Amino acid sequence: MGPGMSLDSADAVVVGGGVVGCSIAYHLARRGAEVVVVERDTLGSQSTGHCAGGVRRQFSSSTNVVMQQLSVQLLAGLEAETGVDPEFRHIGYLFVLTSDRQVEDFRRFLPMWHETGVTDARWLEPHEVRELAPLIQGDDILGGTFCPSDGIASPHAVTLAYSGAARRLGVKLLEGVTVDGIVQEAGRVQAVRTTAGEISATAVFNCAGAWAGEVGAMAGVDVPVKPYPRNIFVTNPMAEVSRRHPMTIDFATSFYFHPEGDGLLFGMGMPDEKPSFNTDVDWQVLDAMAEVIDRRAPRLGTAGIQTAWAGLYEMTPDHQPILGPVDGLEGFWCACGFSGHGFQQAPAVGYLLAQWFSGEQPQVPLDVFAHRRFATGNVEPENNVV
């Protein structure tokens, strides 16, 4: 802990000790802020620990691309900065496209990606898709985009890197502690009530992921984030599959897979998803995916399942995160609603929000992610959601 800091006061309280909360806490502390992180379970135990670990720049919104450029840069320097290797493997991301509309959209994204610095993203003809991803099949493939410097990193390692470095900078990390109220006076945050006592602070960061709406409600702020369970499956060892096989996404269905250990990790969004906090594995999802697997990657279907788990996506109406201070309650900041991209956006988000909090202009303009967009209707959805 910093000099003179006690549990009962801080410059900022971060609610939620997932990868986003830990990144924000670290970056705030690096700029001299006294920070307390409140996590009701253990650090990184919720959505962070249940995600697929992907890191990519291939988004439809240029702000997301620029933000991801920064995340990739920060991941590259993470070990030097914190002593923990993020295990970032550049196996690349491959989007498999099967409709004229997708081809048109992704052909349009390519020049934008190149302009924003993702110079190695390239177009693939159907035969190149099959060469690069030998598990993929289908006469309906019209092409794809591939970025070899995208890939997968370890959510556990990145959370550990930021939480460990934050602790060394004096951040107090409270695990097994629940936030149960946000005290405000005259339109300003004054304190955060927790099961370990009250912490007076003029700023609170809502990094509660799928539970962000509930934290917003404690402050009287409508935070439109809903929890959607997503299931992830890992196959038994598949010796014939290279560990360098790219993260592959069948864009039409959102079916994706990448090498994991000796097998393949895979998952898919369901068209009829309902919001829920239930994280029991839904084996019916596997039945629903069988048809897609059979058509797109039949060899995967013969491998047998070694393990499975479910985590929660924190979805907003436009699949974009909510970042920055909210109108109407001074000192209440959001960093939530990442809609499946929280792990990969966490390094940049921590860096940019700490810049903003310190009174600087964030180096990537974050206006498109402002909470007020839901009131003003100035919404630009992210389309490349997996």
Image (cartoon, grey):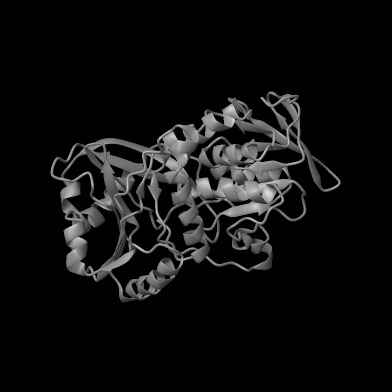
Q: Position of residue 340 (x, y in %)?
A: 46, 50
Residue at 43 percent across and 58 percent down: it is 385
User: Which of the two residues, 347 or 100, is positioned nearer the viewer here?
Assistant: 347
Q: Position of residue 151 (x, y in %)?
A: 34, 49
Q: Residue furthest left?
A: 240
Image quadrant containing the N terminus: top right
Q: Residue furthest front?
A: 80
Q: Where is residue 298 in the image (x, y as percent from the top left)?
A: 17, 53
Q: Can residue 321 be seen at all in this image of the molecule?
A: yes
Residue at 63 percent across and 68 percent down: it is 378
Position above or below: 214 against 69: above
Image quadrant containing the C terminus: bottom left
Position above or below: 185 against 116: above
Position above or below: 312 against 169: below
Residue at 69 percent across and 45 percent down: it is 217
User: Taking 45 as reference, is 183 left or right?
Assistant: right
User: Taking 341 as reference, is 17 left or right?
Assistant: right
User: Taking 219 as reference, is 301 left or right?
Assistant: left
User: Which of the two residues, 332 or 316, is positioned nearer the viewer here?
Assistant: 332
Q: How many labels does the image show?
A: 0
Q: Where is residue 228 in the image (x, y as percent from the top left)?
A: 48, 48
Q: Can residue 45 be seen at all in this image of the molecule?
A: no
User: Which of the two residues, 167 or 274, is positioned nearer the viewer here?
Assistant: 167
Residue at 36 percent across and 41 percent down: it is 282
